[in-house]
Image (cartoon, helix red, strand yellow):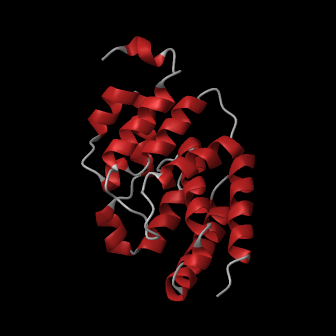
């Protein structure tokens, strides 16, 4: 691996977007749009809410956040191509399907998001950006799905607010999610 390429991350965003686009090729969102539109929006939300000296890595992780879960990508492949930090963030963002099935999605997400050892501050920012994008189109979804997703999201956020020390960015993202949810007509 060429470690020097991580000293200058000018191309990291472009390379991670190209990689994610290739890996998600042929996958569609529920609304029929190419799946890659979701990671792009998540990265845009991260850029809007977060300032960091590691912004290139955060944006790369936002582009790649579903690759371990939804494609044939491995952690080593991410690490070799984008560095340890990006691979670590994407790993933290990936749902453990076994645990999720064992205790239920809502309980799994409450536990994961409230535990700083499971989901560090940077990964939490990306996860909240992911949730913000996911709630942005609930009015266009089937009522039953939208109602369940809204209730699940509010339960998760309430638990996280009670159990986790949140950064200012996390609080702003949670407020944005709640604002979006308040506009969901069910």
Report the quarter where the C terminus lies.
bottom right
Q: Give the vertical position of 19 relative to 162 (above or below).
A: above
Residue that lies at the very extreme toward the left in this rendered image: 72
Residue 151 occupies which quadrant of the picture? bottom right
Between 87 and 29, the one lying in front of the other is 29
Can residue 167 be seen in the rendering of this structure?
no
Residue nearer the viewer, 45 or 160: 45
Q: Quadrant of the N terminus?
A: top left
Quadrant of the rendered structure where residue 73 is?
top left
Question: Residue 81, how many percent across, how many down?
Answer: 34, 28
Q: Residue at x 68, y 63 (%)?
A: 161
Q: Is residue 70 left or right of residue 135?
A: left
Q: Residue at image x 34%, y 31%?
A: 79
- Residue 136 in percent (x, y) is at 62, 66
**Image position of 99 with respect to 74: above or below:** below
- Residue located 49% across and 50% down the image: 39
Q: Position of residue 5 (x, y in %)?
A: 43, 15
- The reply, left or right, for residue 182 in relation to residue 78 is right
Q: Residue at x 53, y 47 (%)?
A: 40
The tally of labels here is 0
Q: Is residue 99 above or below residue 79?
A: below
In terms of image quadrants, where is residue 96? bottom left
Viewer-side residue, 1 vs 121? 1
On screen, residue 67 versus residue 186, left or right, reads: left
């Amino acid at each position: 691996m060429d470690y020097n390429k991580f000293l200058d991350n000018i191309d990291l965003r472009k390379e991670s977007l190209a990689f994610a686009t290739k890996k998600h090729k042929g996958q569609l969102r529920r609304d029929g749009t190419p799946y890659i539109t979701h990671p792009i929006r998540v990265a845009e939300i991260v850029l809007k809410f977060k300032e960091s000296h590691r912004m290139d890595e955060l944006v790369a992780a936002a582009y790649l956040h579903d690759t371990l879960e939804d494609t044939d990508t491995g952690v080593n492949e991410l690490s070799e191509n984008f560095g340890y930090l990006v691979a670590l963030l994407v790993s933290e963002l990936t749902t453990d399907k076994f645990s999720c099935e064992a205790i239920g999605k809502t309980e799994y997400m409450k536990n994961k998001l409230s535990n700083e050892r499971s989901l560090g501050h940077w990964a939490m920012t990306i996860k909240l950006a992911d949730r913000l994008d996911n709630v942005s189109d609930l009015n266009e979804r089937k009522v039953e799905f939208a109602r369940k997703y809204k209730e699940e999201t509010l339960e998760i956020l309430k638990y996280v607010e009670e159990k986790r020390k949140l950064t200012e960015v996390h609080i702003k993202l949670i407020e944005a999610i709640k604002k979006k949810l308040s506009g969901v007509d069910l």
